[in-house]
Every structure is written in C-alpha cells, then in structure tokens.
Amino acid sequence: MSVHIDAKAEDVAELVLLTGDPLRAQFIAENFLSDALRYNSVRNMYGYTGLYKGRRVSVQGTGMGTPSISIYANELFRDFGVKRAIRTGTAGSIQPNICVRDLVFAMTASSDSGTNGMRFGGRHYAPAASFRLLDTAYRIACSLGLSPFVGPVVTTDRFYRDDPDEWKLWAKYGCLAIEMECAELYTLAAKYGREALTILTISDSLVSHEETNAYERQVSFTHMMEVALETVISE
Ligand code: HPA
C-alpha cells in the first residue's frame, strides 16, 4: 500500500497502462482485460488489474498534469515495482498535418513545467521514451495498418494559456503535439530505471481548432489501446 494507492504490492502488475481519466481506466479494464479487479478507488483514481492475452496488466488513472501523474508514477515505480508504464492519453496538435484522431508517439517531451527545473537545480534534463518500447509500438501500429506520427511533444502545466499563440514557438522547433504528463513520466522512469512510453490520440488541434467531444475521447480510442496493450506485453 502507498499513500494514494490502496492495494497490496502483488495486486498491481509489472506491466501498466496509465490514463489521465480514471473512467478510461475502467473502460479499458471492462473492454480489453479479462478477470479485471479494481485494486484502487482512493480519490476515485481507479486502478484495475486483469489479463490481456494471458499476461497480467494493470490500468491506473493518473489525473491531469505533472503533479498528479508524478504521485502515481512515483508510487507505482517505487512501491509497486512496476517495470513498464505506457501512458495512453490525448493531446492537442500543433502541426497543420496532424489532425484529430491521429496517433502521436512521444519520442521526447519538452516542458514549460517548473518541476524538472527544481529537480535538476536549473539544469535542463531531456526526458525521452524507452527506445525499445517506442520501436515496438511503431512496428505494432504499422502492422495494424496505422500511420502514427513519432516525434517530440510538449508537456505543459497550463491547459488555459494567457497567450493563445504560445504553442507556435514549440511548433517552430518541431514539436508535434501538446499534453500535460509525458515529461514527468519519462523523467521518473529514468530515475527508477524502468521503461516508459507515451501514446497519444489527437483530441483537438490548436492549428485548425478542430475538436472531439468527451464521449468520443472516452470510447473511440480503440487503436491507441490496442497498440498500447500489445506493446506493454511485448517481450
Ligand atoms: N493542451 C494541453 N493538453 C492537452 C491539449 C491542449 O491543447 N489537448 C489535449 N490535451
């Protein structure tokens, strides 16, 4: 048991999917796992463990933003011995050729968060995906006939920004999409010597202002989940 996860160490699998929305964790458990049992409901941040193709997999909600995912990722890596964590989430596109429902695999995560500035005493750490997981996910996505974009993303602390054009600087420097958790997940995976990857579905575009609604966000990301589940159980 940890501060925010009310479970025994053995209740959580070594292979974990992370979702910002705890109801998406429930959705994945109910639709993609067999024999799934909920091991956590503290703060309604649901976590489930079940079987995917015979392998034990957990799905844990993380909430939104760096501080929230930091709590769950720290506890999963440190207290539950999680070896591999794949975040499945949503992001806003900041490139004109990346549209809603497209998949983006985050190779690296730049950030406007103060967290790594504090952690590294002002030095600039470069949070990066596990190459093995990224390579595996890319191959799996291609074998499913998908065409994911792979590249750098931005982890922001502010969904609502004072300057509506702030994203354009990140876009100019090649970032593909903006979300709120990836940099912290990659940093903590590195700290604990574990594997991490972030797979994103584009839910809105800062370029075209195209959007998806909450219902679509919860239920329509089957491709992302298939890629994530196949990747998390890969040898
Ligand atoms: N900003 C930050 N996070 C997001 C966005 C966004 O525009 N869209 C989906 N997640």
Image: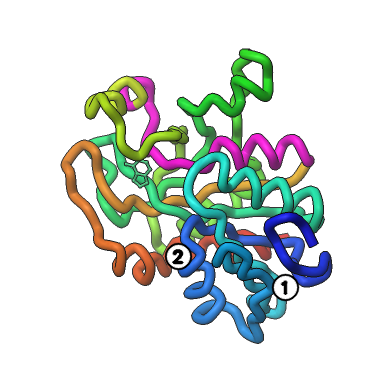
Can you say whether 213 is above or below 64 in the image? below
Can you say whether 116 is above or below 87 in the image? above
Left or right placement of residue 55 versus residue 108 in this view: right
Mark 2: few, some, or many residues within 10 Å (few <14, many ≥20)? few
Bounds of the magenta segment? 171-192
Which quarter of the figure has residue 46?
Answer: bottom right
List x then y, in percent, for residue 79: 81, 54
Which quarter of the figure has residue 144?
Answer: bottom left
Instruction: Judge whether residue 187 is colored magenta.
Output: yes
In the rendered image, the residue lying farthest to the top is: 122
Left or right placement of residue 69 versus residue 3 in this view: left
Residue carrying label 2: 144
Q: Quadrant of ligand 1?
A: top left
List x then y, in percent, for residue 33: 59, 79
In the rendered image, the residue lying farthest to the bottom is: 35
Q: Which mark is residue 5?
A: none
Q: Earlier in the sequence, mark 2 or mark 1?
A: 1
List x then y, in percent, for residue 34: 62, 84
At a point 49% along the width and 55% down the height, the residue shown is: 20
- Report the front residue among 139 and 97: 97
At a point 67% along the width and 24% down the height, the residue shown is: 119
Tag 2 secondary structure: loop
Residue carrying label 1: 56
Q: Type of residue at label 2?
A: Leu
Tag 1 secondary structure: strand
Can you say whether 88 is above or below 71 in the image? below
Q: Nearer the viewer, mark 2 or mark 1?
A: 1
Q: Type of residue at label 1?
A: Arg
